[in-house]
């Protein structure tokens, strides 16, 4: 019965959104390319070939070559894997830290809640990109440092969400009954409270994928993220900006790939929100 209800909700969510199908197609293609890049390209994305630098798009190099003669199409394809890795690690860090802090604040309440939420408010007072740049500057340059910096700057919204969910759940009758029969608080939290907070978090994660991808690419564009010759879209756009008027393809194609992925995941996030969160918690 539950499966049929969920299936009907998903069908309704897709039908009610005129951009649902393009969003699903973009996400599917992105995941396919990111997980299995080799069949989609015939060039090594990190192979230098200076005699072939700045070749325009052709049948041999679909997206042209860059200043080092590296095939742009291959780098875009393998860059999808880097983007997926960035997004996965960042959201795993943000959701995990947010779960711990939000759970402690919502379940324990009192002074613990007050202190943790004030700390969260301090982090929320700064734009996530500015905070990520500050943290990245402390940690140093590199892809790992960028993922840690963005993850560290992204957790406050998850902490707020989890806390709100726990406050709405912990006084439900089944939680009160569990408390009355003597179930320990930790077990009550893990078994009865947190499982009912998963859906809003999943919805929030799908809505955040595009923004996280854009933020990590932005840090790489500023020179704080991936180092050459790593095929990272933000870094590729940065390397091509000096040649935008004459060799336009160097920056245009990776920028277009990033644009499509961000739009695709935003559309996909709306579908998941309408499917799993009909109450509108994440709106």
Image (cartoon, rainbow, N blue to C red):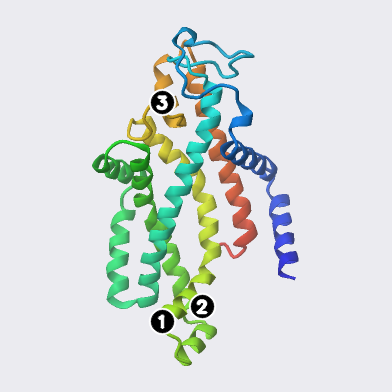
Q: Which mark is residue 192?
A: 2
Q: Residue at x 42, y 29 (%)?
A: 230
Residue wearing tag 3? 229
Residue 20: percent from left, percent from top: 67, 45
Comparing labels 3 and 2, the label whose residue is closer to the camera: 3
Q: Farthest residue toward the top?
A: 51
Residue 66: percent from left, percent from top: 47, 16
Q: How many numbered marks appear?
A: 3
Residue 283 in sight from this viewpoint: no
Instruction: Return the disc, 1 or 2, that comes first in the chain's sequence.
Output: 1
Residue 162 in sight from this viewpoint: yes
Determine whether the residue tagged by mark 1 lies in a helix, strand or loop: helix
Q: Residue at x 51, y 53 (%)?
A: 205
Alpha-carbon distance for marks 3 and 1? Answer: 51 Å
Q: Residue at x 53, y 62 (%)?
A: 200
Residue wearing tag 1? 185
Mark 2 residue crowding within 10 angstroms, few (<14) / some (14–19) / many (20+): some
Alpha-carbon distance for marks 1 and 2? Answer: 10 Å
Which picture quadrant has residue 97? bottom left
Q: Farthest residue toward the left?
A: 138
Determine whether the residue tagged by mark 2 lies in a helix, strand or loop: helix
| Quadrant position of the N terminus in the picture | bottom right
In the picture, measured across the screen, residue 97 lies left or right of residue 13, that is left
In the picture, measured across the screen, residue 76 lies left or right of residue 167, that is right
Mark 3 residue crowding within 10 angstroms, few (<14) / some (14–19) / many (20+): some
User: Cβ–Cβ below 8 Å for labels 3 and 1?
Assistant: no
């Amino acid at each position: 019965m539950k499966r049929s209800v969920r299936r009907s909700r998903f069908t309704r969510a897709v039908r009610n959104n005129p951009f649902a199908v393009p969003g699903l197609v973009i996400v599917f293609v992105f995941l396919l390319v990111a997980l299995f890049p080799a069949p989609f390209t015939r060039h090594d994305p990190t192979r230098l070939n200076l005699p072939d630098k700045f070749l325009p798009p052709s049948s041999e190099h679909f997206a042209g070559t860059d200043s080092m003669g590296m095939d742009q199409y291959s780098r875009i394809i393998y860059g999808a894997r880097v983007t997926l890795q960035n997004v996965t690690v960042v959201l795993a860090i943000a959701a995990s830290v947010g779960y711990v802090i939000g759970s402690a604040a919502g379940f324990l309440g009192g002074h613990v809640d007050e202190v943790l939420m004030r700390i969260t408010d301090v982090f929320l007072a700064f734009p996530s990109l500015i905070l990520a740049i500050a943290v990245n500057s402390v940690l140093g340059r590199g892809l790992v440092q960028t993922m840690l910096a963005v993850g560290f700057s992204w957790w406050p919204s998850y902490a707020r969400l989890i806390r709100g969910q726990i406050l709405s759940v912990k006084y439900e009758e089944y939680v009160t009954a569990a408390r009355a029969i003597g179930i320990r608080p930790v077990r009550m939290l893990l078994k009865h409270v947190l499982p009912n907070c998963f859906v809003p978090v999943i919805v929030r994660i799908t809505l955040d994928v595009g923004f996280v991808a854009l933020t990590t690419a932005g840090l790489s564009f500023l020179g704080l993220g991936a180092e050459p010759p790593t095929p990272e879209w933000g870094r590729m756009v940065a390397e091509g900006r000096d040649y935008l008027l004459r060799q336009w393809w160097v920056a245009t194609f990776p920028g277009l790939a990033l644009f499509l992925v961000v739009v695709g995941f935003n559309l996909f996030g709306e579908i998941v929100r309408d499917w799993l969160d009909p109450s509108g918690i994440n709106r």
